[in-house]
Amino acid sequence: MSHQSTEPPGIPSGPRILLISPRGPLYRHRTGIWKKSLRYAPLTLTTLASLVPPELGATVEIVDEGISDITPDTKADLVGISAITGTAPRSYELAAEFRRRGLPVVLGGVHPTLLPDEAARHADSVVTGYAEESWPELLRDFVKGRMKARYDQSPALTLSGLPFPRRELLSRKHFTVFHTIETTRGCIHHCEFCVVPTAWGKPLHKPVAEVVADIRQMGAKKLLFLDLNLISSFDYARELFTALIPLKVRWGGLSTTLIASDESLLDLAARSGCRGLLLGFESLRGDSLKETGKPFNLRREYREVVRKIHDRGIAIQGCFAFGFDHDDSGVFAETAEFAIEAGIDLPRFAVLTPFPATPLFRRLDGEGRILTTDWTLYDGQHVVFEPARMSVSELQLGIERAWKTAYSYRGVARRLLSSRVQLPLSFAANLGYRFYAHNLSRFYTCREALV
Ligand code: B12
Ligand code: SF4
């Protein structure tokens, strides 16, 4: 059960706040295919809970529909729902239900940030961008009976002096990695498909001393950084990795392939306890990398990137996308074979997804190539646009084939024998992804509708 609520002792009872992270089909409690071996604790709801001003004496309950169900009689005075694009329709469905019961609903998160006017049609208030200042302001307004229809991120927002996320509100038993943390936000790059520059813009950093204090207070020995690009600033990354060394933690995080361009930074990452990196390789084809605004990823370097990282005992989760305008039907086998030969510990394959408001969405929309705005299908595994050099079904089935090839028993064995780093952890995650790969097609219910 992950419904958790708390009321600070000795403080008179204030509003009951219910915070929800809605399910997506793949990530749904019980019927989804995102196994525990792949699951790490998100920070969204625990962060929002930590930002509730103490003087309000509020009760906070959090529900993550990826791991539990909402009970129909859940009581609250205010409901906050966090929406990413794939979960936006479910968010609107829940919002309608709560509003029918007379409960005010606030929508926030990346999707309402990208499409605030759409979100506003389903909520009493919409919060865009990061909510470290605006959410407490909204709550104070709410108790005074003057909640506004919209709150935007302040341009002056900084990430210093913030409370630690209230991780105690989540039950650890649901997650393989419970101790997650965030140090930076935003990214300096502008990849055409990425929501980060569109939604959040320039990078913000937490003071390293505060990151260290959080790690110490949670007593973490195994950590995952959720930052989308931990090395946006090499200087910050260097300061952070240096500060991690005395903590003797093992950690994983997301980076660009650029980390391999600076061996001293890579050495420092390894010395600070880095045991796994998620890298966006995206494509093996130079034309596609240019098309998508990721020129710093060049194929000729990939094997070298993999070797340098493996040499330091760091496992690689390598992400590839299919559906670029330069992709043809040969791309799936070529990419899966590369992942196997290069010994990528955990390859992941996504369909290029034009998330709303991104430059990619605007381009494809301008070319009349967006096939659906059913946001449920914007989950990185469904084709939602007209590909340039293959049919929708070729792309949809090609991605499934790539998953199955890379996660066949032979594929897993060849990859892990070639890599030989972090084997026990990597093996467990490979089994999780093998299950995912072999069950993906269960969710292709809309294939016929799109083809
Ligand atoms: C944990 C995580 C997951 C988890 C949980 C998802 C969830 N619902 O939160 C899992 C593993 C399930 C997941 C899956 C996917 N994810 Co994900 N995930 C993340 C990740 C790495 C961390 C989220 C987090 O904890 N952030 C830290 C918190 C503090 O930040 P935050 O969530 O943005 O919240 C702040 C504000 O946005 C705001 N806010 C957020 N919600 C609300 C609600 C209210 C009421 C208010 C007031 C404010 C507010 O306040 C917070 C404090 O400032 C983010 C990247 C990131 N670093 O944010 C991607 C991210 C959310 N995921 C993303 C994607 C694309 C996916 C997948 C499609 C990937 C895939 N191919 O499988 C799937 C789709 C899931 C689905 N459709 O069902 C994208 C979303 C893009 C989009 N437009 O939808 C992100 C942004 C990463 C990216 N590539 O850019 N993901
Ligand atoms: S490097 Fe990663 S986080 Fe940065 S814009 Fe590109 S895809 Fe997004």
Image: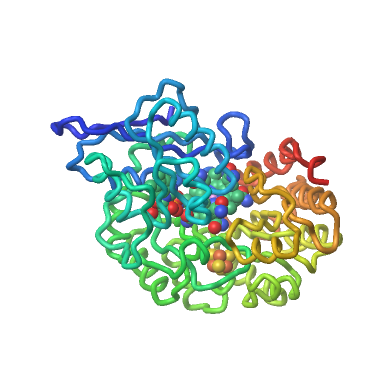
In the rendered structure, the answer to whether residue 56 lies left or right of residue 301 reads left
Picture quarter with ligand 2: bottom right
Q: Is residue 77 above or below residue 383?
A: above
Which of the two residues, 425 or 367, is positioned nearer the viewer here? 367
The type of colouring in the image is: rainbow
Instruction: Count the numbered circles shown.
Output: 0
Please tell me which residue is depicted at 60% across the width and 72% down the height of the picture. Answer: 308
Q: Quadrant of the N terminus?
A: top left
Residue 334 in view, yes or no: yes
In the image, residue 439 lies at what x, y percent?
72, 37
Please tell me which residue is depicted at 75% across the width and 36% down the height of the picture. Answer: 445
Q: In the figure, residue 203 lies in which quadrant? A: bottom left
In the rendered structure, the answer to whether residue 89 lies left or right of residue 165 reads right
Which of the two residues, 229 or 426, is positioned nearer the viewer here? 229
In the image, residue 385 lies at what x, y percent?
74, 55
Please tell me which residue is depicted at 74% across the width and 49% down the height of the picture. Answer: 403
In the rendered structure, the answer to whether residue 331 lies left or right of residue 230 reads right
In the image, residue 244 lies at what x, y percent?
36, 63
Q: Is residue 51 above or below residue 104?
A: below
Please tell me which residue is depicted at 48% across the width and 73% down the height of the picture. Answer: 267
Residue farthest to the top, as pictured = 73
Residue 222 in view, yes or no: no
Q: Is residue 310 above or below residue 10?
A: below
In the image, residue 415 lies at what x, y percent?
71, 56
Q: In the figure, residue 351 lies in which quadrant? A: bottom right
